[in-house]
Amino acid sequence: MNGPEEAEAAGAFGKLLDERWSCRAFLPDQVPDDVIARMFAMAQRTASWCNTQPWQVHLTKGKATRRFAESLTEHVRSRPPAAPDLPMPEEYHGVHRERRREAGYALYAGLGISRDDREARETQYLRNYAFFDAPHVAVVTTDRGQGVYGAVDCGAYVTNLLNAATSLGIATIPQAAIARYAAHVREHLGIPADRLVVCAVSFGYADTAHPVNAFRTTRADVAEAVTVIDG
């Protein structure tokens, strides 16, 4: 049976999960180097297939982040998405489509953007590639030779990175959107050809006064995700 120490640890972890959210408006303040170092050290404890630890991170800060944002935004404005390194979802069906639409509607409603305001929607879309003005961007890549399981391990790493950041008072948003332009990301950051671009994690301190940061997504009931087989 779990004792009081285990119950306390579980309670603290549950609270951490409840408090994490995706930030879409950041303050310009840089995160101190020692806090960043601690955040990434915590994420490095992520379990991986045969302990291969396939993730590598290209991390920007200061002017490097702004140069990256400007370069990527201009690239997105002038070119259609090229082939991502990892396949994107082809389409969404059933409950997955419903959840995606619910999140999108809530986001735009929170910003006061109507469904038919294409210009405002496009402007908000491009905010992805400016990293929502975050002062730091971590581009996560995986080893090309490890295929699907390398990407799965990187997903676990990203999750731990998000939770580590939350525990340190740092706001985050994971961004798969940048993977649509993997070739440009690779060229700009000097990422080797044997690495596959998985996603970015933009982070910093949240602009809590911005209305977009009042938006939250919902979660399905556990019974919808877990099938118990007994006996």
Image (tube, rainbow, N blue to C red):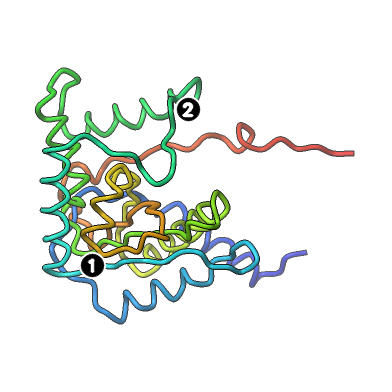
Q: Is residue 157 above or below residue 102?
A: below
Q: Would residue 2 appear left or right of 134 to someone viewing this image? A: right
Q: Callout 1: few (<14), some (14-19), or many (20+) C-alpha neighbours within 10 Å?
A: some
In terms of depth relative to the viewer, which is nearer, 133 or 109?
133
Q: Is residue 33 above or below residue 205?
A: below
Which picture quadrant has residue 189?
A: bottom left
In terms of depth relative to the viewer, which is nearer, 10 or 153?
153
User: Residue at horizontal 48%, vertical 60%?
Assistant: 143
Amino acid carrying label 2: it is His
User: Can residue 15 be seen in the rendering of this structure?
Assistant: no
Looking at this view, name the residue that lies furthest to the right.
231
Q: Position of residue 140 (x, y in %)?
A: 38, 59
In terms of depth relative to the viewer, which is nearer, 16 or 177?
177
Dot 1 lies on which element?
strand
Which picture quadrant has residue 168?
A: bottom left
Q: Marks 2 and 1: CB-CB under 8 Å? A: no
Q: Quadrant of the C terminus?
A: top right
Q: Position of residue 75 (x, y in %)?
A: 15, 45
Which residue is denoted by mark 2 in the rendering? 96
Q: Which mark is residue 89?
A: none
Q: Tell us which disc is closer to us: 2 or 1.
A: 1
Question: How many dots with numbers?
Answer: 2
User: Residue at horizontal 44%, vertical 58%?
Assistant: 158
Looking at this view, name the residue that lies furthest to the top.
116
Q: Which mark is residue 60?
A: 1
